[in-house]
Amino acid sequence: MTDSSPQAQDTMPPLTPDDIIEYLKNNPDFLKKNPEVCEFLIPPKAKEGKNVTDFQSFMIERLKGDKEKVLEKTQELVENARSNMNNLQRIHQVVLRLLEARNFEEFIHIITMDLSAMLDTDIAVFVVESNGQDIPHIHTSGIRVLPEGTISNWMNEQNVLLQSNISGIEAIYGGAATLVQSQALLRIDISMNTPPAILAFGSRDPNMFDEEQGTEMVSFLARVVERAFRHWLDIPR
């Protein structure tokens, strides 16, 4: 039977440094679970032997590393916020430009010529599936026509498709396809009775568009384009 009396406890051998070292070896996360212990420790200020680590220097270096990581993360957040604000301003300018169109031909010209420069891409193209009879003015210069089912296969039921490090599609970009290395495809649903369409933006920068990017702003642009089409072609929703 074990004796738990105070006299028995007083006879227990004291802990030795080796005991503590052995315990810490078996419990490497001890300080992580008990960080307050660090307040009671006095780390060496300099190395006092080949097996003694300058714990203070280690802590300082770790703090420096943590600070650098925080600064890098903060800088990344600032740059992302600045980029988002810049993109938002561009989208606003594009919408205002679309509203300035005086006729359908100018509206298409803005989409296929002005938008690429305003959004800092290399090319913008409006593409529609059709047999040539579904949408008025479908053969207007600047609109590309593709066989039925093509766009649906590309978009795979997505409203926005952002792709990086690609080869441009000739059916969309024509002779400029060899320049395109990233793209944004925005699905344009003009009305219930018109075929699928997309607004495509291509860039020679392979990382300008990426699937990890947010799509809220370009989705808003697509909705504006849809409404403008219905206005100019007098097509009900």
Image: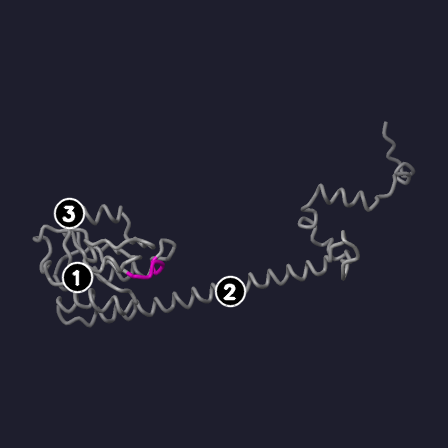
Q: Earlier in the sequence, mark 3 or mark 2?
A: 2
Residue type at mark 2 is Thr
Neighbor class of circle 1 (other Cα within 10 Å; few <14, some 14-19, many 20+) is some
Mark 3 or mark 1, whichever is nearer to me: 3
Residue type at mark 3 is Glu
Stretch in magenta: 203-209
Neighbor class of circle 2 (other Cα within 10 Å; few <14, some 14-19, many 20+) is few
Q: Residue at x 13, y 58 (%)?
A: 235
Q: Position of residue 3 (x, y in %)?
A: 88, 32
Q: Position of residue 108 (x, y in %)?
A: 16, 65
Q: Position of residue 37 (x, y in %)?
A: 74, 53
Residue annotated with mark 1: 229
Q: Position of residue 70 (x, y in %)?
A: 55, 62
Residue annotated with mark 3: 148
Q: Is residue 75 left or right of residue 161?
A: right
Considering the whole magenta stretch, tell me its main secondary structure: loop
Does the stretch in magenta take in 106?
no
What label does residue 66 carry, if any? none
User: Please, what secondary structure does the residue beneath circle 2 have?
Assistant: helix
Q: Is residue 133 left or right of residue 218?
A: left
Depicted 90 relative to depicted 158: above or below? below
Depicted 16 relative to depicted 144: above or below? above
Report, in whole angstroms, how far the alpha carbon at label 3 lies from the one at label 2.
Answer: 48 Å
Residue 45 picture quarter: bottom right
Residue annotated with mark 2: 74
Which residue is more in the foreground, 119 or 136? 119
Q: Is residue 166 left or right of residue 72?
A: left
